[in-house]
Image: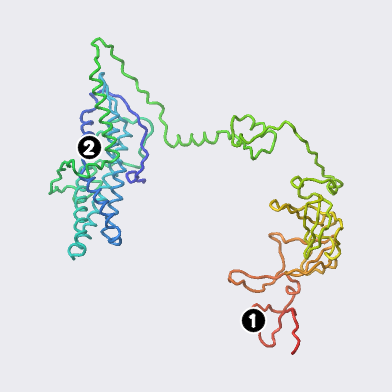
Amino acid sequence: MELLWNKLDLNRPSTSSWTTLSNKFDVKHFIQSINKISNDLQSQELFHKEATILSRLIYRMKTKFRHDKGLKNMEKINRALCNYFYLSLDKEYNNLKDSIIIDDFNLVTLPTRQMLQYVLVKTQGFAKLMCRIQETAFCAGEFFRARVIIGQAWTFSMIAWSTVARIWMLSRNLVKKCCNWYNNMYPFLMKLQVIGVNWLPSDYCLPSDLRDWLSLSWINEQTECSLAVEKLSNNSMFSLIKTQEETADIAEKLEIDTENKLNKQKSVPKNETKIDPIIHDVGVPISRESFNFNLEMDKKNVKKVKKVDIKNIKTIEELNLLSTYDSYPGLDNVKLVENVTTIALSTKLKHTTSVTECNQSLDSINPGTLMTLNIKKILSNGLQVVFNEDNVGYLNQIYLNKPLSSYEEGESIVGKLLYIMPTVKLSYFTELLADKMAIKQIKIGEIIDKAKFLFRDSNGIILHLMKGVRDEKPKIGDEIMARVLGKNKQGNGLLFTLKKSLVDSDLPILSDINDAKVGSKFNGTITQITPRV
């Protein structure tokens, strides 16, 4: 069963009312009970003062006594007191009182049974919260009492002990008062009518006597000390500390006093026509679950309006839709150009392989354009070329069709533009053009006879594969034959080889020099022969 009284944020029922004759309901006793409860809740200045002192003590003691069990219990009390201020039980009783209207036609407008059930459940939670404060304050007092007995930091311990003792006494008194509040309001529950959907769950039952429900051993004990609240002097610092609820109540009282003065100033004629009583329309009762379901259905049925931005226009329809907007981001940067240029594109081979002969601006040349290049200088790793009379470009030797030694200065070649560095305006080309030959996959261990040595690099030698030979990388999920060489330096991965001679060999792999023994056989490659001296 769900514990409604243990919820700090409890969903309140719908605010509604019903009308009956004044002789059928004891309105006077009902209002007197609510007024007494409101007065008791609003006269807890001493309790609020002790809560303020407790929070200041925790701030002073939290560094030196941070591991003290008494301080830990004081922090628990402080959190419970914060929940007490957040609960604002006096507001709930004031809302219940505001729902009562007595007119001149012997009719009374009263709150619904669901509204009183909500207030009683909140009163249950209030009583349990006060019990929690009382028990925790008793535990904290035991720790500080022991510290005073042994004489350790007895000054702070005595102040803290006296503070939690006063909170313990005041919370016990509030628990007893809360039982009286609940027991006085419970008899009116069955006299009120149910309007709309039931608020309490079917398996939840409100207790008829809060004392029996709490089952505390000291609930019927008489309080030995006096709980008279002394009126705070005007010079006290605590008289300046007001909660938000007290400030709102003061403002509300000022408004009521102002309205009463204005009503007294107005003169009511004797022959004034009496107004007929207003017929209250209670509306159609709906549950909170069905209301949330209707909101979700409305959200699903809302048509999604396509948002068009000036940066992501792709079709003519989106451009026409954007033109209907009165304003959109980037409107100030849009310029209307009357002269429209149409560019004809072609995918024919004779057009794509044609070389551009006319001089073009460097900013108007697109990557992939074929151009005539004049070799200006032969570098150690490529060529420096000139195009468009004064523009400079480069070709790396890995992008040449022939060995670097076969090129001469002043020779003209055809190259394809790869990219242009915008900062230095240098262009980079390739002489390797796309061929239409069949592509053949190179397998591991396969002997390639259609290759030509180009040059030596730091990583090895660079070969130029002839037409019809192309290497392809394995795809994810392909099954390949590999052999484990060893572990990586971190020890969380393995090193494999795809070399065919090592994969097919029956000899072990020498992954650690300590595994080498006299007479062992391993695969190896001669890298250098040192002559005898």
- Residue at image point 68% right, 77% down: 509
Vertical relation: 110 (above or below) 442: above
Q: Of all residues shown, which one is farthest toward the bottom?
A: 533
Q: Is residue 116 left or right of residue 165?
A: right
Disc number placed over residue 381 in the picture, else none: none
Residue 374, horizontal then vertical, whole percent:
84, 55
Residue pictured at 87% horizontal, 58% vertical? 411
The quarter holding residue 181 reads: top left
| Disc 1 element | helix
Query: Residues under labels 1 and 2: Cα distance?
Result: 90 Å
Q: Quadrant of the C terminus?
A: bottom right
In the rendered image of this protein, does residue 202 appear above or below residue 407? above
Query: Relative to the observer, which residue lies in front, 269 or 90?
Result: 269
Disc nearest the viewer among 1 and 2: 1
Front in this rendered view, residue 285 or 304: 304
Q: Quadrant of residue 376?
A: bottom right
Three-letter amino acid code at the position of disc 2:
Ile
Label 2 belongs to which residue? 37
| Color theme of the render | rainbow
Q: Nearer the viewer, residue 44 or 7?
A: 44
Q: Position of residue 300 (x, y in %)?
A: 54, 36
Q: Is residue 385 above or below residue 208?
A: below
Of the pair 251 and 502, the residue shown nearer to us: 251
Is the residue marked by circle 1 packed among few (<14), some (14-19), or many (20+) residues within 10 Å?
A: few
Q: Earlier in the sequence, mark 1 or mark 2?
A: 2
- Callout 1 amino acid: Ile
Residue underneath mark 1: 513
Residue depicted at x 74% and y 46%: 363
From the top left corner, tell me how far across and down residue 111 is, in percent: 30, 30
- Residue at the far top in the pictured view: 271
Q: Residues within 10 Å of mark 2 (few under 14, many from 20)?
A: many
Q: Secondary structure at mark 2?
A: helix
